[in-house]
Image (tube, rainbow, N blue to C red):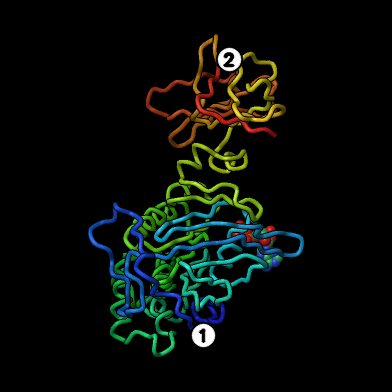
Amino acid sequence: MATPLRNPIVDTDAPVATLRGGPASHVTVAHSTAPAGPVTLGAGNPAHHVPGSGMDLHLRQLSKRYTGVAALDGVDLHVQAGELVALLGPSGSGKTTLLRVIAGLLHPDAGQVLFGKDDATRLSLRERNVGFVFQHYALFKHMTVAENIAFGLRSRPRRKRPDKAAIKRRVEELLGLIQLPGFGDRYPEQLSGGQKQRVALARALAIDPTVLLLDEPFGALDAKVRVELRRWLRQLHERTGQTTLFVTHDQEEALELADRIVVLREGRIEQVGTPDEIYSDPASAYVFDFIGRANVLEGEVRGGRFHLPGHARTFSADGVAEGPAKLYARAHDIAPGTDDEGIGARVVAAYRLADRITLELHVQGQARPVELDFTATPGLTTPAPGSDVRLVPLRYRVYSV
Ligand code: ADP
Ligand code: MG
């Protein structure tokens, strides 16, 4: 059974500071593509911000050390009101630590967290009024869906608590928003995993949070449901305009969902950018590798060009330091070439996946195989294993090592 003590929005004893109700100048509508009319998310409490608004979030030089490891190491970030930002990185890169510091569940060793212009660094989770959803966010099993959603509002101190009718209206509204109207009387065990996470999200939204923090909320669900839910979440975000931080280790999820992506590496920010920027212009080999499959060719930069040992063709490497280097190219950014162009390679194997054929090739002098993707359209023929081909990287990046 979920124990109330572990629930972040249940910290009823904490004093409540007024962080909310800042000037209307905080309000930014992030998405002009929002469907007709914003959804009313207020529970009739005038102190609440206008629906469709969110709060700016500033992180300044946040650091947190555990014995022997810097979980966060000087993190600076500005999330704009209404933005949906994905924190992306491998396990152990500091994503959860960052979210917990923003929520007030964990105090940083150094640095500041600001909501709008207010320094929230010393405030508790309750005072910050954040909404939090975890990967395994146990709903209260003994409470109905409606009671779960209402929980954050019901546990407010009396003077801040909406009346019963207002809470009921709010719950109905949220059930509609998460596309589970009529589910209010069910118990969590009568829901699928995806439905439970939607209820957890409604519960986080019920308090009209300053920021919404989602820590791998779909991580425990199967692949198909995960894809559906992330599209749904994106649409929901466009209606609610909540300032949202979404943690994931799944690059596809981040690319599809986010306005901007923050790539973390060992407690530091490696790159911040739109999904397009991150995908097309990875700032480092680390980011390139992490965002999608990468082909890597080892060589060196001489006279501003990348040379592949044993091959005549060279590649531009402007601005890359002279010396050992690696050329990175995605599987779909390499085209077959003619005899007098490209890099010689031999087909080792062909793999058929659902909708694509991947060729594995050996490039002379290279330890790692190169992979090429072809969309498996009807009638497609690909070179057979054993045949020699030429490869032309159409889009690539060279990084010094
Ligand atoms: P992520 O969410 O990206 O997987 P975390 O923020 O959970 O990463 O962890 C970042 C680093 O901090 C890891 O090296 C992890 O082992 C360490 N860490 C996290 N929490 C603790 C803790 N309570 N005690 C000691 N080390 C921790
Ligand atoms: Mg984590």
Q: Which residue is drawn at 33% across and 81% down?
A: 167
Q: Quadrant of residue 209?
A: bottom left
How far apart in space, not on screen, are marks 1 and 2 (Cα)?
Answer: 72 Å
User: Residue 354, position in %: x, y?
Assistant: 45, 37
Left or right: 50 in relation to 122: left
Q: In the rendered image of this protein, does residue 391 appear above or below residue 65? A: above
What residue is shown at x 44% (from left), y 61% (from top)? 244
Answer yes or no: is residue 303 visible. yes
Q: Nearer the viewer, residue 129 or 363?
A: 129
Instruction: List the residue tagged with mark 1.
Output: 15
Q: What residue type is labelled 2?
A: Asp
Relative image position of residue 195 (x, y in whole percent): 40, 65
**Which amino acid, by three-letter code, is at mark 1?**
Pro
Where residue 151 is drawn, which disc sits there?
none
Which of the two marks, 1 or 2, is nearer to us in this view?
A: 1
Q: Depth check: give the residue in front, 178 or 159.
A: 159
Find numbered disc 2 in the image and state the secondary structure of the residue it sits on.
strand
In this view, the residue in front, 271 or 200, is 271
Position of 65 relative to 148 (above/below): above
Residue 190 appears in the picture as rendered? no
Q: In this view, does 102 lie to the left or right of 241?
A: right
Of the pair 106 and 370, the residue shown nearer to us: 106
- Quarter, ligand 1: bottom right
Which residue matches tag 2? 388
Name the residue rendered at 58%, 75% in the picture. Answer: 122
Q: Residues within 10 Å of mark 1 (few under 14, many from 20)?
A: few
